Amino acid sequence: MKERRVLVVEDERTIAESIAARLRAEGFAVEIAPDGPSAVAQFRAGQPDLVVLDVMLPGFDGLEVCRRIQADRPVPVLMLTARDDETDLLVGLAVGADDYLTKPFSMRELAARVHVLLRRVERAAATPAPPAIRLGDIEINEAERRVRRDGADVHLTPTEFDLLVHLAGRPRTVLPRERLLADVWGWGDGSGTRTVDSHIKALRRKLGADLIRTVHGVGYALELPA
């Protein structure tokens, strides 16, 4: 099996080296970037399979790093935040992060989250893709992991794509947030419902506000065009 590469973007050297040591012990090849500009440069040069990304960085912050790398190539991003600030978390998820951890966190939890994110991407790549799904002017091509609207490509992060496919496979069915967390993210509890909400907002922004219906207090359903 090909050695999977992780880029750790963290300006606190002790934390960066601790994360790198744990991930290397898990079998990953790890590089460290201490600031925003070097993170983008190392991402483009090394083509990592996953990025562990701190929000607070010199040069420019992790949110800008996430915007730039996701514009280059969709890649799973685990964002690290210094405090449990809802605005920071939602902005991070909106610019393309797939998951987040709030400091302080355990290295075991971080390693588990990294494995879950990579397994999801690998499972999606290995699963035979059905024919393209059409939703009005939207086309979802699972084989190419590509979405088009009116013939133009729409850039989705890996998690946004997986969430859209999951909803499109069950049109008009209301799926609770907890089920979406379990099926798409692989989480066993409902503690990340804000993650679901943020990714739904991103899909609506990119593909149209009417595509996904909110059932308050329950979850979401994908609506088929009339």
Image: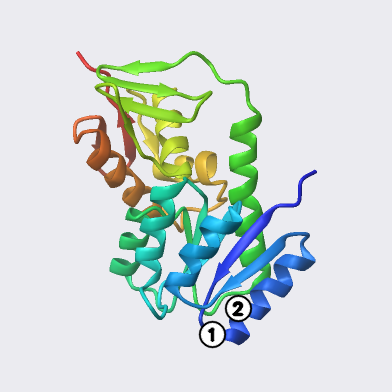
Circle 2 sits in a helix, a strand or a loop, which is it? helix
> Label 2: which residue?
16
Q: Please rate how many residues cluster around mark 1, counting C-alpha atoms within 10 Å: few if below 14, some from 14 to 19, many from 20.
A: few
Q: Position of residue 56 (x, y in %)?
A: 40, 77
Residue nearest the observer in this picture, 44 or 77: 44
Q: Looking at the image, which residue is at 59% across and 85% down?
A: 13
Q: Please rate how many residues cluster around mark 2, counting C-alpha atoms within 10 Å: few if below 14, some from 14 to 19, many from 20.
A: some
> Label 1: which residue?
12
Q: Looking at the image, which residue is at 27% across and 46% down?
A: 201
Circle 1 sits in a helix, a strand or a loop, which is it? loop
Would you place residue 102 above or below residue 225 in this image?
Answer: below
Would you place residue 33 above or below residue 4 in this image?
Answer: below
Q: Position of residue 212 (x, y in %)?
A: 27, 33
Q: Looking at the image, which residue is at 28% across and 67% down?
A: 87
What's the residue type where badge 2 is placed? Ala
Q: Quadrant of residue 170?
A: top left
Judge from the rendering whether residue 13 lies leftward or rightward of residue 139; answer left or right: right
Q: Are marks 2 and 1 in contact (CB under 8 Å)?
A: yes
